[in-house]
């Protein structure tokens, strides 16, 4: 039986790699469902059809309507990467105005394995709420790949490769028999 991975992303530059990352997750044995914050969905509007064809599931960025059947199977794990400062703070504070943040907030109570990797520059990382949010999520069992072995902030305006290998390896640890 194939395990289901919800691959969620916020509006940070690595979200542009979602089609490639979805393929890699599928190679690791996942049935992938892609979900995006509203701004990330706008950024990937031209890639949405490709993601839907690749995954066989609609790309979601909005909550379903009351009474509407869910278009996705139940998640076995959720990887929220890249996650911006806004989304990680909203999640830690329980502010669920975006679809992905609402799903992961509820995922804590459902016991779904949750993995996240921030994508913030060093200026954002200095804000005291960011550190509190990382600590809060870790305290409730979320695997936050931040710091050594995960995402290390760069200076504003600098770019470096996003450590997708670390995120996918952490998710793969939740695939039965891996």
Image (tube, rainbow, N blue to C red):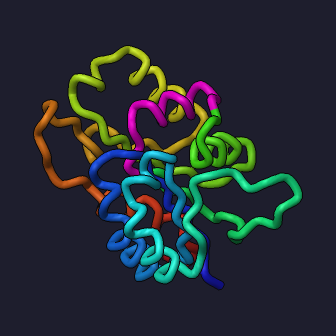
Q: Residue furthest right?
A: 67
- Side of 14 relative to 59 (left or right): left
Decide which of 53, 45 is in the foreground and name it: 45
Q: Residue furthest top?
A: 128
Q: Main secondary structure of the magenta part?
A: helix
> Is residue 14 shown above or below 92?
below
Q: Quadrant of the N terminus?
A: bottom right
- Side of 166 relative to 104 (left or right): left
Decide which of 117, 86 is in the foreground and name it: 86
Q: Quadrant of residue 73?
A: bottom right
Q: Is residue 89 magenta?
A: yes
Q: Residue at x 50, y 61 (%)?
A: 7
Q: How many marks?
A: 0
From the top left corner, tell me how far across and down residue 159 is, in percent: 13, 46
Q: Residue at x 27, y 50 (%)?
A: 13
From the top left corner, tell me how far across and down residue 166 is, in percent: 32, 57
Decide which of 66, 127 is in the foreground and name it: 66
Give the extent of the magenta segment: 81-95
From the top left corner, tell me how far across and down residue 164 is, in percent: 30, 60
> Is residue 69 shown above or below 162?
below
Q: Residue at x 41, y 51 (%)?
A: 81
Q: Quadrant of residue 102?
A: top right
From the top left corner, tell me how far across and down residue 129 is, in percent: 43, 18
Q: Is residue 21 magenta?
A: no
């Amino acid at each position: 039986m194939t395990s289901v991975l919800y691959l969620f992303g916020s509006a940070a530059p690595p979200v542009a790699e979602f089609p490639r990352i979805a393929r890699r997750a599928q190679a690791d044995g996942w049935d992938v469902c892609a979900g995006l914050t509203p701004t990330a969905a706008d950024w990937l509007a031209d890639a949405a059809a490709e993601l839907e064809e690749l995954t066989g599931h609609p790309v979601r960025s909005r909550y379903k309507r009351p009474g509407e059947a869910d278009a996705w199977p139940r998640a076995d794990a959720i990887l929220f990467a890249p996650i911006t400062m806004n989304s990680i703070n909203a999640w830690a504070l329980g502010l669920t105005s975006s679809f992905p943040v609402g799903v992961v907030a509820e995922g804590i109570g459902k016991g779904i394995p949750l993995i996240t990797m921030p994508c913030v520059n060093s200026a954002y990382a200095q804000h005291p709420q960011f550190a509190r949010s990382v600590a809060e999520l870790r305290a409730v069992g979320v695997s936050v790949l931040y710091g050594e072995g995960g995402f290390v902030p760069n200076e504003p305006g600098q770019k470096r490769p996003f450590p997708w290998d670390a995120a996918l390896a952490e998710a793969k640890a939740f695939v039965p028999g891996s």
